Structures are given as structure tokens and as C-alpha cells.
Image: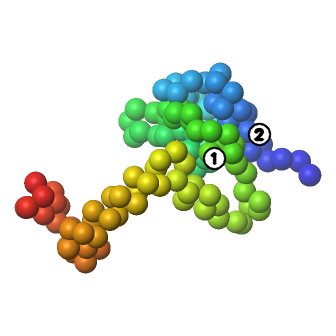
Amino acid sequence: MAQARYKQVVDRFAAEITGGRLPPGTRLPTHRQLAADEGLALVTASRVYAELAAMGLVSGETGRGTFVKETAVPRGQGVDQHAVAADMLDLNFNYPSLPGQAELLRNALRQLAAAGDLEALLRYQPHGGRPHER
């Protein structure tokens, strides 16, 4: 079965980013320019960037453009993972990804629990934080 045109563009950009040909910080073409360059509809070009953002490869900044993100994560723990099925939600990114990160999280949670105000932290906080934390 033939792959959708936008998926081909997504895969090409993903390969260029993960292969280092598009380094972090590179500004990508505007949605309109991508649509014109690739012969796509504007909504399809937007979908290409949305897919790349969902993969963690790019980030868009309103008024500034779309930029390549840093992807220096060990193989098998980041953007090179593929979903088993299109309708499956990948929760692999919920695992601590760096050595020692689990211990840091464990210590932070212990400190929160020992603070005695854990219930308050589970509710919405005032804008700007609570006065005693400023």
C-alpha cells in the first residue's frame, strides 16, 4: 500500500533531523512555503509540522516559525521509537530517560511528602504561586 504524501514528507524531515543534516535550532520553512515547495495544501503542510512536533523533533513558536529541537537522546529511548499501531498511544516516554533521573525524582517526591502540605499541592495554585513560596 502506498504511503500518504504528507507521511513521506514527515519521514524525510525526520530522517534529516535525526541524521544531523538539520541541526538543532534550524528554522524550517513557513507552512505556506512548505506547502508551495512540496505541492501540498496548507492544511497538509501544517499536519506535517504537527506530526514532527508530536514526534518531539520540532517546536513551533507563533510569529517566529518552526525550529528543530535537540534530539540527543540515546537510541531506543526517544524519537526513533515507532508505535505498534496507528491507534495505539505510546507511553514509553513516561519512563525516566537519563541515568540518575529516577533517584532525583524519588528524592523530590520525598521532600514534597515531608513538607506536610501535599494536599494543597494537588489543587490549583494561585497565579504567581502562594505567598510563602515567593
In the rendered image, which quarter is residue 63 located in? top left
Image check: 22 left or right of 85? left
Q: Is residue 124 visible?
A: no
Q: Disc 2 vs disc 1: Cβ atoms closer than 8 Å?
A: no
State the image coordinates of residue 25 (x, y, percent, origin top left).
48, 26
Depth check, mark 2 against mark 1: the one in front is 1
Image check: 44 left or right of 53? right
Image check: 45 left or right of 98? right
In the rendered image, which quarter is residue 13 located in? top right
The mark found on residue 58 in the picture is: none
For the rendered model, the colour scheme is rainbow
Work out which quarter of the rendered image holds the C terminus and state it. bottom left
State the residue lying farthest toward the left. 131
Gap between marks 2 and 1 measured at Cα: 23 Å
The type of residue carrying mark 1 is: Gln
The type of residue carrying mark 2 is: Gln
Instruction: Determine the residue positioned at 46% across, 49% down.
Output: 101
Q: Earlier in the sequence, mark 2 or mark 1?
A: 2
Instruction: Determine the residue positioned at 62% across, 58% down.
Output: 92
Q: Residues within 10 Å of mark 1 (few under 14, many from 20)?
A: some
Q: Which residue is mark 2?
A: 8
Q: Residues within 10 Å of mark 2 (few under 14, many from 20)?
A: few
State the image coordinates of residue 29 (x, y, percent, origin top left).
55, 28
Instruction: Determine the residue positioned at 52% across, 33% down.
Output: 70
Q: Which residue is mark 1?
A: 77
In the rendered image, which quarter is residue 19 located in? top right
The front one of 118 and 124 is 118
The front one of 9 and 87 is 87
Image check: 128 left or right of 77? left
